[in-house]
Amino acid sequence: MTSRLRIPCFSLQHTLECGQFFRFTKVLDHYIIQSSNKIFSIRQVGEFLFYEGVEEPFVIQFFRLEEDLDAIYREIDRDPIIHQAIEKYRGLRMIRQDPWECLISFLCSSAKAIPHIRSMIENLCKSSGKMISRGKQVGYGFPEPHSMDTPLQLEQVKAGFRTKYLVHASQCIDREDLLSLRNLSYKEARTRLMRLSGVGKKVADCTLLYSLDFYEAFPMDTWIIRGLRKSYFHGKKTGEKAMEEFVSNHFGRYAGYAQLYLYQFWRHQSH
């Protein structure tokens, strides 16, 4: 049965297609999404979302529909560049991902383009996750913590150098450990995550921002570093530490939201 929800400030397309989340397929005018061992379909018509396969509280929590996006805009809209990004991608919201799934997704993302990341994650779920279905839709959930025991088990995933990181994460951390990071400060939580093999600043920041509500996290990749250097540092070569200090002071407590908009803006500027 299809349910309906009215959300005035939301863009389903921008939210799903901005690179923060990988497990969806677009079919005509709707998206099939897999998350937290659920498969659901969702589409948007104007201000209304139509969805099947999950309850309303899950949709609200997953897409952070409880957040006052206009209030967040008022906090981060500090200059003409971010203003342009907000105007172009208005309604883009941060997805609240399962922390374990988020960590594993971004461990897969290292040095890969988005289509390759999505393919690798699907292969990982097919090889080590459990089958889930809804009606005629069949998919595979994420492998649970402690379920990836050896690199041999992940051979068909074709994860390359990332294989050892996936196995190590599976053996060393679980969902409860990740959720407990919420009790720490942002810097402490990032330091703790970076003790895991293969988890650098970017993977740690993506996990903290997209799944654990650390809005001050500001993941830095090539697009972001290049864009910051050109737009905010007049093209001067600038270290990541100086950039981190700048975005924290400039965008404030919702710096991570600014990152999401700037990433989408700069990534598509060259197209």
Image (tube, grey):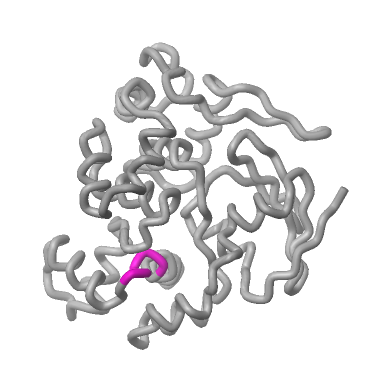
The image quarter in which residue 198 lies: top left
Quarter where residue 268 is shown: bottom left
Give the magenta range: 253-257
Q: Nearer the viewer, residue 190 or 262?
A: 190
The residue located at (44%, 13%) in the rendering is: 153
Is residue 271 visible in the rendered structure shown here? no
Q: Is residue 207 above or below residue 91?
A: above
Q: Give the farthest residue toward the front.
A: 183
At 59% across and 58% down in the image, what residue appears?
63
Q: Nearer the viewer, residue 25 or 170?
A: 170
Spot occupied by residue 47 in the image (x, y as percentages of width and height): 73, 73
Is 131 situated above or below 99?
above
The percent position of residue 74, horizontal first and vertical second, equals 43, 83
Q: Position of residue 28 (x, y in %)?
A: 76, 54
Residue at 51%, 52% (x, y): give it: 96
Q: Residue at x 67, y 53 (%)?
A: 57
